[in-house]
Image (spheres, grey):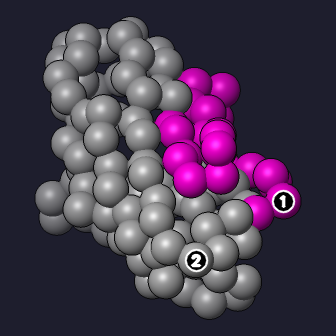
Amino acid sequence: QVQLVESGGGLVQAGGSLRLSCAASGSSFSLYTMAWFRQVPGAQRDMVAHITGSGSTYYADFVKGRFTISRVNKNTVYLQMNSLKPEDTAVYYCAAKLGVRPYDSWGQGTQVTVSS
C-alpha cells in the first residue's frame, strides 16, 4: 500500500508542455508498477503510461512519442507531456499496483487543460 500525491497540472496552450509529478510514500515502492491514467467527464478512465519496478514502460498509442514516464529517486514518478493537444484535456491520476493485482492505490488527480 502506497500513498500517492500528484502535482503539476494546469492550463497550457496546444503545442506546449507540462510535467506531472507523483510523490509516493509507503513500503516497497520500488516493487510497484506505477501508472498514469486520465479521465474526461462521462468517459472511462484510460491508462496513459506505466513503468514497472524493473523499468519497463508502456505507452498508450494516443500519447506515444509525445509523453514520457520516468521514475527518479525511487519515490517519484513523472509524466513529461510534450506537444499537448486539446484532446489531452483530462484529469490525470497516478496509480500503483503490486504484481498482477489491479491498481489499488490512487492519487487525488490533477487537472490538465489544453487550449486551442
Give the magenta-colored segment's residue range. 53-79
Q: Position of residue 82 (x, y in %)?
A: 49, 19
Question: Is label 2 in contact with label 1 (beta carbons under 8 Å)?
Answer: no
Q: Is 68 situated above or below 103?
A: above
Residue at the spot x=53%, y=47% of the render?
A: 76
Looking at the image, tell me whether mark 2 or mark 1 is earlier in sequence order: 2
Q: Position of residue 47 (x, y in %)?
A: 50, 59
Q: Is residue 15 above or below residue 6?
A: above
Give the residue number, with chain letter if any, for mark 2: 27
Q: Is residue 15 above or below residue 65?
A: above
Q: Tell me the SS state at disc 1.
A: loop
In the image, residue 75 lies in the stretch drawn in magenta: yes
Q: Is residue 51 left or right of residue 19?
A: right
Amino acid at the residue labelled 1: Ser
Q: Secondary structure at mark 2?
A: loop
Q: Nearer the viewer, residue 108 or 81?
A: 108
| Amino acid bearing label 2 | Ser
Identity of the residue drawn at 66% across and 26% down: 65
Residue 33: mark in rendering: none
Image quadrant assignment for residue 101:
bottom right
> Quarter of the image holding residue 106?
bottom left
Residue indicated by mark 1: 54
Image mark count = 2
Q: Residue at x 20, y 28 (%)?
A: 10
Q: Nearer the viewer, residue 70 or 60?
A: 70
Give the quadrant of the C terminus.
top left
Q: Nearer the viewer, residue 10 or 47?
A: 10
The reply to whether residue 62 is visible in this rendering is: no
- Indicate left or right for 65 with 12 as reference: right
Give the x, y percent position of residue 53. Answer: 76, 63
Say if residue 4 shows up in the picture: yes
